[in-house]
Amino acid sequence: MDFILLVGKFIGAAIVAVIIVVLLAIIGFRFWISRMMKKAMTMPNYGIPIINQPRVKLTAYRGETAHQAMIDQLIHEAEHLDFHLVQPNYLFVSDLPAGIYVYFLQNRIKTQHIAIYDSEQLDKPMIDMMQCYQDKTIRGVSNSPFASLPYPSNVKTEKLPPETSLTELLHYMSTEFSQDGIFAVQGEKLSSIIEQLYAMQQDYLIHLNFADYAYAKSQVDKFAQDNPKQKQSPEELQEMIQMIQDNMREGYEHNIPFIVKDRFLKENKMDAAEWQNYDDNIVIVHERQTAETLWDEHFQNYFIEYVHDEKEDDWVDQPLVDETVMAQLNDLKDRYIHRPFDYVNAVLPLLPKERQFKKLGGIKYPINAELYYFA
């Protein structure tokens, strides 16, 4: 189980990090199967990004879930231990494609909390438990079978074997964790807290540029363990690990523009009406871009146009500026190849007067980024 610090009014545990793990497990191994099939057909395959939704929405749900008999047994076990289902809503469904359902329970004094996850993609429900403390530390325990994602250092979690029962998890939390200074959380706030925690974890993973080898390997190892008949060579296993890492990086890169805008709006308290003045014309520059990428995505159209050469019957580049400026632009790409902010500052004065960019602002976390707009 992965926990993330919740800033503001509440301090809670990121029980939903397991949702990301489930999603990666599902998607990642579809890539594996697709890759093996295409390889057999001698078709090249470079994979596609593993994209997690940057935000999640939990909606109250009425009905049964995939392993209802097991769920009912776990709820009965929890009630025997003096826990109760959170009212008025205790069951929520996420808008993630993995179809994750979350049941919430807590003890009478609202200091210990249980989340039970259910999905058709799981062999059986998973259990997370947590306690939150007034000194802003968090302790949690889980029987999730999936590898953990990283979390901030002020959060401490323990993962017990998947066969650990709800009673055993609770006993561990009650005896191994301090019971002094615990922070009570109102049950009706748990779903909104989880939405915030999911957002915070996505931000944190982007901050880390997370594509850990050990994490990718754990996904491959688990798939190999669960599918012993699908034999793969060591070289194919390493290839899959690298593929998952690359696709994770691409997935997080895909989410950067959304995350930057969302963070910028919150930090600057800009309302929707004010943001509409900029939204269509925003250019985001962040620390992981290169000068070549910025040129291709944002600037080259102001200095080059594609025209049809009738003699050659082909499309060719035609500079819109003289050779001196083009030489200067090429030099800037080489000089600032891995210094995106310096590159932009050097290119802006060379833009046509009718297409000037102005800096709107920037953020430092989860990624150092600057926002520009067409003046």
Image: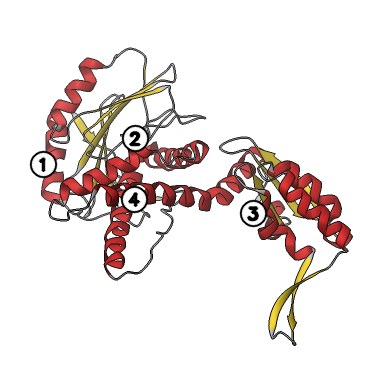
Tell me if residue 215 comes above or below residue 80 in the rendering: below
Check contact, mark 2 vs mark 1: CB within 8 A.
Answer: no
Which type of secondary structure does the marked residue at label 4 adopt?
helix
Q: Earlier in the sequence, mark 2 or mark 4?
A: 2
Residue 18, by quadrant, is: top left
Tell me the distance, in whole angstroms, between the alpha carbons under discs 2 and 3: 47 Å
Tell me the distance, in whole angstroms, between the alpha carbons under discs 2 and 1: 21 Å
Residue wearing tag 4: 239
Q: Which mark is residue 73?
A: 1
Check contact, mark 2 vs mark 3: CB within 8 A.
Answer: no
Q: Earlier in the sequence, mark 1 or mark 4?
A: 1
Residue wearing tag 3: 293
Q: Quadrant of the N terminus?
A: top left
Which type of secondary structure does the marked residue at label 1 adopt?
helix
Which type of secondary structure does the marked residue at label 2 adopt?
helix
Q: Amino acid at mark 3?
A: Thr
Residue drawn at (67%, 47%) of the image = 285
Of the two numbered discs 2 and 1 in the rendering, the one whose residue sits closer to the viewer: 1
Of the two numbered discs 3 and 1 in the rendering, the one whose residue sits closer to the viewer: 3
Q: Earlier in the sequence, mark 3 or mark 1?
A: 1
Q: Amino acid at mark 4?
A: Glu
Residue drawn at (13%, 32%) of the image = 165
Residue drawn at (22%, 19%) of the image = 174
Residue wearing tag 2: 187
Residue 315, by quadrant, is: bottom right
Q: 352 left or right of 134?
A: right
Is residue 356 visible to the viewer in this orientation of the structure?
Answer: no
Where residue 235 appears, as percent x and y from the top left, is: 29, 49
Q: Earlier in the sequence, mark 2 or mark 1?
A: 1
